[in-house]
Amino acid sequence: QVHLVESGGGVVQPGRSLRLSCAASGFTFSDYTMNWVRQAPGKGLEWVAIISYDGSKKYYADSVKGRFTISRDNSNNTLYLQMNSLRAEDTAAYYCARELLGGIPNYFDYWGQGTLVTVSS
Amino acid sequence: DIQMTQSPSTLSASVGDRVTITCRASQSLSSWLAWYQQRPGKAPKLLIYKASGLESGVPSRFSGSGSGTEFTLTISSLQPDDFATYYCQQYDSYPLTFGGGTKVGIK
């Protein structure tokens, strides 16, 4: 079955960097568009970034554009989110989510369990 | 960007009640709308896709309707497992956007 497991979260000071990973299994990772979605404590869901199945297309939310970079390693079935110049408002649980095949864009059919990022001095 | 507005933001209901949640979009989505359920401390779970399509394994008491700019999620008979927060999401265009959520609590 499909599994998405995020890692790499933690406590980081403002202005520093962090890289999140999402290990995928149970499906052909290289066929699927993947996303990062975040949720600040007690708040709603915010889409962060998307990467096409082959890594050729990437889109970002305005709130992270220029600071975050999404990437993937299809040979290792892993999705990444490089987060630079972190701010307090980036504090959130970060989820990786698989987008349904076919149709651009599409809804998310599987989500990971999330990894918590806390930006604090 | 397409803005998604859910109402109500919270509601209290009893087991067995019929519950309806509304989601309005700032522009037409056709039927490109999904609904998710999120229990505390857990990842969101897909319930409904393309406005009214029931995801495999989701109980039939959940249903979705609507098109264009107005959509509803209905739970026909609320069960204890259904006390959670529900989000709509548009996938008509980037950036993908979510509604603010509706928390369904116990009356």
Image (cartoon, rainbow, N blue to C red):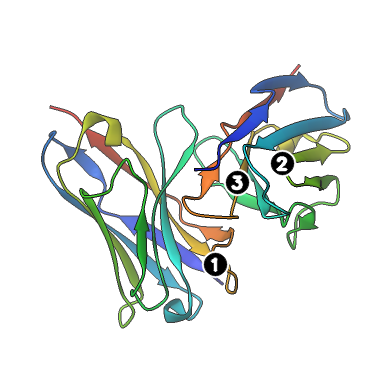
Q: Is residue A115 above or below residue A21?
A: above
Identify which amino acid the numbered label 1 is placed on. Answer: Ile
The percent position of residue A60, horizontal first and vertical second, equals: 35, 53
* Real-space CA distance between mark 3 and mark 1, rounded to the nearest whole angstrom: 14 Å
Instruction: Mark 3 vs mark 1: tell me if same chain.
Output: no
Residue B62, percent across and down? 81, 46
The residue carrying pointer 1 sits among few (fewer than 14), some (14 to 19) or many (20 or more) residues within 10 Å by Cα, namely: some
Q: Mark 1 and mark 2, same subunit?
A: no
Residue nearer the viewer, B53 or B92: B92
Q: Which of marks 3 and 2 is in front?
A: 2
**How far is disc 1 from disc 2 in space, using C-alphas?**
20 Å
Residue picked out by circle 1? A104
- Are the residues at dot 1 and dot 2 in contact (C-beta closer than 8 Å)? no
Secondary structure beneath dot 3 equals: strand
Residue A110 location (% of width, % of height): 55, 60
Which residue is disc 3 drawn over?
B89
What amino acid does circle 2 point to?
Thr
- Tell me which amino acid carries mark 3: Gln
Rendered view: B11 above or below B21: above
Would you call the spot at circle 3 few (<14 residues within 10 Å), some (14-19), or many (20 or more)? many
Residue nearer the viewer, B92 or A9: B92
For the residues carrying marks 3 and 1, which lies nearer the camera in this image? 1
Residue at (50% x, 34% y) in the render: A44
Of the pair A98 and B31, the residue shown nearer to us: B31
Q: Name the residue under label 2.
A: B69
